[in-house]
Amino acid sequence: MEATNEAFLLKLLETPSPSGFEQALQRTWVQHVKPWADAVEQDSYGTVWAVKRGRSDRPRLMLEAHADEVGFIVQHISDEGFLHIAPIGGADRALARARRVQVLGSNGPVDGVLGHTAIHLRDTKDEKMPEWHELFVDVGARNREEVAALGIRVGHPVVLADGPFRLQGRRLVGRALDNRLGGFILAQVLAALAETPAAATVYAVNAVQEETGGYGARMVAYRLHPDLALVLEVTHATDTPGLDARRHGLVRLGGGPVLTHGTANHPLLVERLLAVAEAEGIPVQHEASSRRTGTDADDIFPTRGGIPCALVSVPLRYMHSPVEVVDLDDVAHTIRLLVAFVRSLQPDDRFLPELTA
């Protein structure tokens, strides 16, 4: 990875962006993609998109990722100055004790720790995972008044304070790789298209509030109403101990981007992605969706009269944790696949099954 690209990815990973509080991350993303875009726009809730006009009026392709991450929110402040929290999105309370955090207060970030009673003082017999209301953040305050003086109140978001690092060169560890990778990939695709415009017009969308219900994707899909959409996400790498492929399928870290079959995924779009991957020599993996994909694709494809949609995912280990792991070769292959897919689109592409002919 080039140094400038790596610096941008690390900046994305280091910028907190819990669902509903994505503004700082979105400003960073917009400033980076502006040089390659013909226009940059936003909606009232903070979803942003960069437009790269093609040589033709159609097809209009939306490439979509989400900008938000899971986290916590201050629910209550005790007289003694401890912050009690609730989850934002699918945060995991099993790993929430004894961790460093940042409270995103009115006066800027405040360091803290998630308290954890020492093993010497706990009754460990039949010990269970703590409930959310049993967790608390210690910011070093002695009372509620000192918490207020730090600029912290009920309703401020909290994120884990874990920075990114490399494992064996090609593997990257970080909080919020789900789904900073999507925003990073969008930027790389825009940069590639800036060199030689494609026939299709591309709307590269970094959407808010996926982790809490796909609301940003729903709003922007209705607003833009593209001819087709690709959703960029991460998916579970299932090649670690304790996971049964019979239950979860088999996705390997380093095995290439993952194409999903079923539900929201339009068969003709998936076929085109497969053909492009084969032509370009890009390895791909497969996963099945029997009910819902659990991604923004579920909110995009039924919009208005239906938008042909497909999900392209990067394999990821240890999702919704501070030690998410990705293989950078998978990221590079995903960028290549998306650029080649965009260049494959022609004005007469309809992606309409022949059912009534």
Image (cartoon, rainbow, N blue to C red):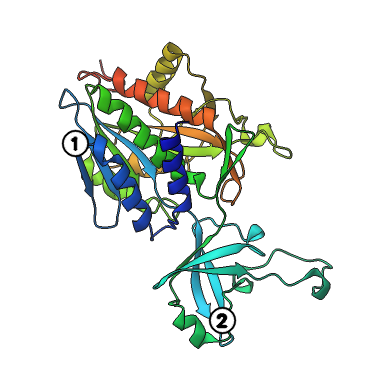
Residue beneath disc 2: 141
Residue 153 sits in quarter: bottom left
The three-letter amino acid code for the residue at tag 2 is Ala
Q: Secondary structure at mark 1?
A: loop
Residue 208 visible to an observer of this rendering: no
- Characterize the local packing of mark 2: few (<14), some (14-19) or many (20 or more) Cα atoms within 10 angstroms: some
Residue 296 appears at what percent x and percent y?
A: 40, 43
The residue under the point 21% across, 18% down is 348
Locate residue 96: give its quadrant: bottom right
Q: Is residue 256 above or below residue 216?
A: above
Q: Is residue 24 left or right of residue 122?
A: left
Across and down, in percent, residue 312 comes to 44, 31
Q: Is residue 292 left or right of residue 341?
A: right
- Specify the quadrant of the image occupied by residue 114: bottom right
**Viewport quadrant of the C terminus:** top left
Q: In the rendered structure, are the residues bearing label 2 and label 1 in contact, judged by CB atoms less than 8 Å apart?
A: no
**CA distance for labels 2 and 1:** 49 Å
User: Does residue 209 appear left or right of residue 147 in this picture?
Assistant: left
Tally of numbered discs? 2
Indicate which disc residue 318 carries: none
Read off the residue under disc 1: 38
Q: Amino acid at mark 1?
A: Asp
Residue 357 against residue 121 in the figure, above or below: above
Task: Provide the secondary structure element on which disc 2 rests.
Answer: loop
Residue 50 x/y as whole percent: 25, 40
Identity of the residue drawn at 47% across and 45% down: 10
Q: Residue at x 82, y 68 (%)?
A: 124
**Residue closer to the observer: 129 or 53:** 53
Q: Sequence-wise, which precedes: disc 2 or disc 1? A: 1
